[in-house]
Each structure stands twice: as structure tokens, then as C-alpha cells.
Image (spheres, grey):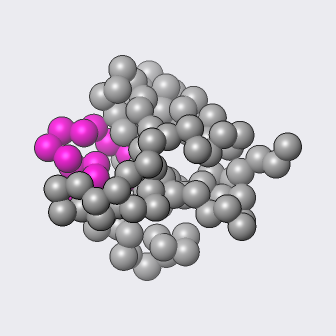
Amino acid sequence: MDFYKVLFHPKAKKELDQLDGSVRKVVLKQVAKLRETPRLGEKLGNKAGLDLTGYRKMYAYKKKIRIVYRIFEGELLVFVIAVGDREEMAVYRDAFKRRKEKGSGSH
């Protein structure tokens, strides 16, 4: 079985690092699952004017934290673009903005 490599957008890594230690541990457990089963998360689409088609979301820490990521099949790569709480769609807005940033689309 092939394992996927997981990479973080620099800002997503910063978000992860800013989480409380116990919360970060739970988030990292979820992210680790993506190495074997990257399609675990739900597909995202175009919602509230934020087109995240091609991205997926995964829940962590009692569904309070969202992990937004994209799968690059040919490279066996999972690229985490945002980590944060859903409050006021902030994590999705961040992910949407980062799609166009240098390095996000092609990691």
C-alpha cells in the first residue's frame, strides 16, 4: 500500500503550531490518517461564494476544528491549506485566499 506524504501550507503550519497542545495532538492524529486514507474527509464545493472545489475538509477536536486539504494523486501528496475553527467560515475564507498564493496550487 502506498502512503501519501502530507505537506502544510506555511500559514496552515503556523495555525497548527498555535493550537493548544492537547488540541494540536488530536489534529495531528487526524492528519496522520490522511497518509493512508486521503479521501476520509468530505468534499468541499462552492459555498457562500467560496469556491473550494477540489478540496476536502476533515473534522478534529469534537468537530470544532476543520482541516482543509487537497489531494494530489499523481504525487501521492496531501496538501493541508488551512487549520482552524469553523466560526464565521474563517477557516474556509483562509483556505480560499490561500489557493491563489504562490506555492498553494502546486505546493
Q: Position of residue 25 (x, y in %)?
A: 51, 27
**Residue that appears at 42% across and 29% down:** 60
Residue at position x 36%, y 39% from top?
66
Name the residue nearer the viewer: 17 or 87: 87
Q: Is residue 1 left or right of residue 47?
A: right
Position of 78 with respect to 19 (left or right) is right
Residue 62 in view here: yes
Percent position (x, y) of residue 65? 34, 34
Q: Is residue 100 above or below residue 55?
A: below
Question: Would residue 84 be counted in the magenta stretch?
Answer: yes
Expressed as whole percent of the image width and height from the top left, the position of residue 72 reads 62, 63
Whether 84 is drawn above or below 103: the answer is above
On screen, residue 93 versus residue 38, left or right, reads: left
Q: Residue at x 18, y 63 (%)?
A: 49
Q: Which residues are magenta?
A: 82-94
Query: Foreground: 37 or 45?
Result: 45
Which image quarter holds the N terminus?
A: top right
Observer able to see residue 14: no
Across the whole image, how many numbered discs are drawn on residues? 0
Q: Residue at x 39, y 24 (%)?
A: 61
**In front here: 35 or 1?**
1
Above or below: residue 26 compared with residue 94:
above
Residue at the bottom extreme?
102
